[in-house]
Image: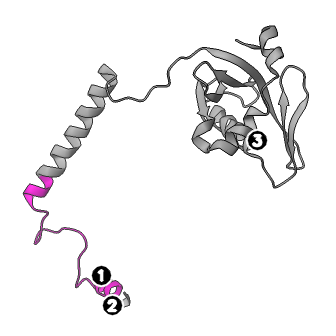
Amino acid sequence: MRALAAAIRNGSIKISPDSDKPIPRPILMAAEALAFAALAAIATGRTTGVGLADTPDIATLAHRDLQLAEHDDGSAAVIDAVSRATLIEVGPGSGAFAVEVLRNLARDRIRKGAAAEDGPYVLALKADGRLVVEDPQTRQQVELRAFGKLQAEAFAGLMPAADAANKGGAK
């Protein structure tokens, strides 16, 4: 390995093309064709919608509005946005899955130009049985079953009781 590095440094092995050894024309033409094919596929997908992944708009059966409360000491809590009750609390330097999901959604809000405190996140049970966390500000959705059964169950425990959903908790 040292011999290879020394040969590159002293110029006996060149890793870039020069006028004596240019890149062969067929390789350049193939790279150009590949780039144009990629651009054509992207343009076709954007104009026709073919090949693009889209989250279906499915009715919400029950929901709970959540907020993330970050404390100065590094601890955090997930709270109910309506009742202000603490649902999950973690100490400094530790994190629960629910807290980390909301932290990532808060980072996404900031990246997209919204303030992290611009309203609650929505934990929603969809009509097809999916449990998702949605950010109404950025329209970002986190499908919880993608992270496994245990992680989805952590959020399922935050859902309001069935009778609360029937008394106006559903959107």
148 sits to left or right of 48? right
Which label's residue is closer to the chain start, 1 or 2? 2
Q: Which residue is mark 1?
A: 8
Residues marked 2 and 3 touching at CB (< 8 Å) = no
Q: Amino acid at mark 2?
A: Ala
Which label's residue is closer to the chain start, 3 or 1? 1
Q: Which residues are magenta?
A: 4-28
Mark drawn on residue 23: none
Picture layout, residue 166 above or below residue 134: above
Q: Which residue is mark 3?
A: 99
The residue positioned 81% from the left and 23% from the top of the image is 160
Q: In front here: 41 or 142?
A: 142
Mark 3 Cα within 10 Å, few/some/many (few <14, many 20+)? many
Could one spot residue 136 in this view of the protein? Answer: no
Q: Quadrant of residue 89?
A: top right
Which label's residue is closer to the chain start, 2 or 3? 2
Residue 12: within the magenta? yes
Which-is-in-front pick, marks 2 and 3?
3
The residue positioned 8% from the left and 57% from the top of the image is 25
